[in-house]
Amino acid sequence: MFYKDLYEPIIPRKRLTKNHQLLATAKKRGTTISNPKEFYRAKKGDTLWTVAKKNNIPFYTLLKNNSFAIQRLKPGDKLVIR
């Protein structure tokens, strides 16, 4: 063992934010909608969770295909649902 091994700095790993964790899970669990046919216009008060429940689609599928909306869903945003 060399002394340099003892004194090398430990590089901390970046912690993933909650949004990055959700997107990583959505990549694994969600299915990709390759040729979208149905869309949903967001209304005031909508969240991704409520849109998924209203349209009877899995949350992670909605998130995977509309990852732009994870930060803030605004009224008038066009979401792919099928």
Image (cartoon, grey):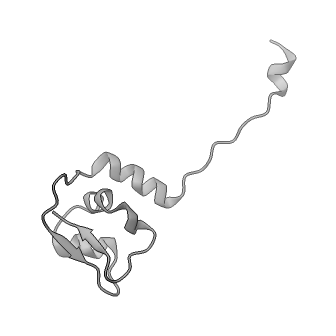
User: In the image as oriented, which residue stretches furthest toward the bottom?
Assistant: 44
Residue 40 place in picture, x, y as percent: 21, 75
User: In the image as oriented, which residue stretches furthest toward the top?
Assistant: 1
Count of numbered marks: 0
Relative placement, left or right, of 53 versus 10 is left
Rendering quarter of residue 4? top right
Up the image or down, 24 lies above or below 66; here it is above
Relative placement, left or right, of 14 versus 25 is right
Up the image or down, 20 lies above or below 68; here it is above
Which residue appears at 27% of the width and 52% of the height? 30
Q: Which image quarter is the N terminus in?
A: top right
Residue 73 place in picture, x, y as percent: 38, 76
Which residue appears at 84% of the width and 27% of the height? 7
Rendering quarter of residue 66? bottom left
User: In the image as oriented, which residue stretches furthest toward the left?
Assistant: 37
Up the image or down, 49 lies above or below 19; here it is below
Which residue appears at 55% of the width and 52% of the height? 16
Residue 14 place in picture, x, y as percent: 62, 47
Rendering quarter of residue 78? bottom left
Residue 74 place in picture, x, y as percent: 38, 80
Which residue appears at 12% of the width and 64% of the height? 37
Q: Nearer the viewer, residue 62 or 18?
A: 62
Q: Which image quarter is the C terminus in?
A: bottom left
Q: Nearer the viewer, residue 79 or 47?
A: 79
